[in-house]
Image (spheres, grey):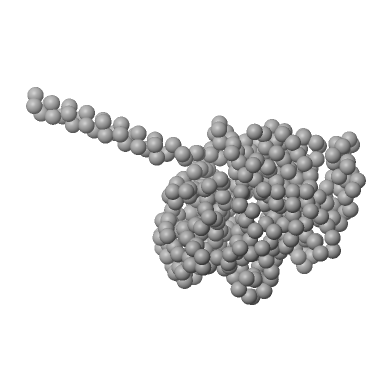
Amino acid sequence: MKNQGHSLALLFLCFFISILCSGCTKSENKDKVVIPVGNVVGTGSILNLSDYAESIEYIPLETNDSVLISKIDQIAFEDGAIVIKDDYYSCKIFDENGKYRCSVGSLGEGPDEFVSINEIDLMPGTNQLFMEAVPQKYFLYDTEGNLIQHIQYPNYPPDYNAYGVTRLNENIYYADIVSYLNIHYQGMLFRVDSSLSEVIKEYPNYVHREKEYKHGFSGTYEVATTYRFKDNVRTYKAISDTVFTVGPDMEMRAAYIFDFGKYKATPEWMLAKIRNKELKYVWPLNIQESDAFLFLKFFMGNHAPEQFTFVKTYSDGTKVNFPNYNVYGVFNKNTGELKLMNQPEKAQLGFKNDLDGGMVFWPNYISSDGKMVSFCNTQDFLDYYETLEDPSPGIKRLAANLPPDSNPIIVIANLKK
């Protein structure tokens, strides 16, 4: 009887511990959202812009001989300022009506100059622009183009390659780390105080490697993409299935997990740089995030249902044909539903613009106040206008006052509240 009582007590203790552990696991995972990609590969439908946005507007950018934009590489829109990264060498600021304000920074090899621009980050509510430039320089400007601070990068091991430097708060920055000698860390935070910068936290690497590489890393697969969402920095790699977030407490957690199922590319394949099997896998290429949705761009290889070929023109005029294996999708953060998108027009990816009958729409940036921001080439807009049987009054007015050689048009779709 004594042994039986002891066994019952031990059984109860194990049951109680299992309940506690179950509760801990549930608590730890409550903020992780699983995105069921594998379940929907091969499906798709045309999604209407009106189901997500309540209105659309067009902002022609001012054009004159000293303000010419060759190609928009990156765009941001906050607090009445439109910031355009024009290819790799120029950054221009316009107001909310498209009137030119200023150009930011200057080319050169001086302390406050740069050779090219990697990334820009327009921070809401601050009227401040962070710029990551080459060679490994970081600048803080106001939205009138004035230099506020030349940010010093902290001392770090020489084998570290830092990418995607993103501002977490007023003086703390996140940087993704790629290293072919030190495989233990994948990111870090550094604090900027006046002219001094110091590393304050490093994050363990979450991508398993069998060994260190002595001759380099695996290119873009191993370089993370980072972006800010509210007061968090998000970071993700194509080599992984997880979008991580770093919040005000400076801890790193999983925010979203892509469940690719049988279509998941293994880290071993990506790190081995074997490209002849890539068309069998699926991975994320780009994420735009709003309060309620993730707007996703996937590489889907042979699983893309509407493949097509497009022509890419290089700066020297050379034209090359490329196959498109990308598929767009929208993930509803409230319901957990992922919808993959069919092309509303042949070889055009995005939402069908049923708000005013305009061109297919897809956001390149989402502002803190719920504006989905995109752009289009003026000549493309005018060519599309010619195909419309009954254009809306707004599109008709815009086309009537738009010279073909004008700067691009900013297109803004206001998300539903």
Q: Is residue 62 visible?
A: yes
Q: Is residue 201 left or right of residue 128?
A: left
Q: Nearer the viewer, residue 303 or 155?
A: 155
Q: In which quarter of the view is residue 213 placed?
A: bottom left
Q: Is residue 47 visible?
A: no
Q: Nearer the viewer, residue 16 or 83?
A: 83
Name the residue located 64 percent from the left edge and 75 percent from the top edge.
109
Name the residue located 78 percent from the left edge and 51 percent from the top edge.
98
Classify the position of the C terminus by image quarter: top right
Please provide percent x and percent y for residue 260: 53, 43
Q: In which quarter of the view is residue 336 placed?
A: top right
Please provide percent x and percent y for residue 236: 53, 51
Classify the position of the N terminus by image quarter: top left
Q: Residue furthest right?
A: 400
Q: Nearer the viewer, residue 284 or 371?
A: 371
Name the residue located 51 percent from the left edge and 68 percent from the top edge.
195
| 209 lies above or below 292 | below
| 126 lies above or below 137 | above
Name the residue located 67 percent from the left edge and 52 percent from the top edge.
76
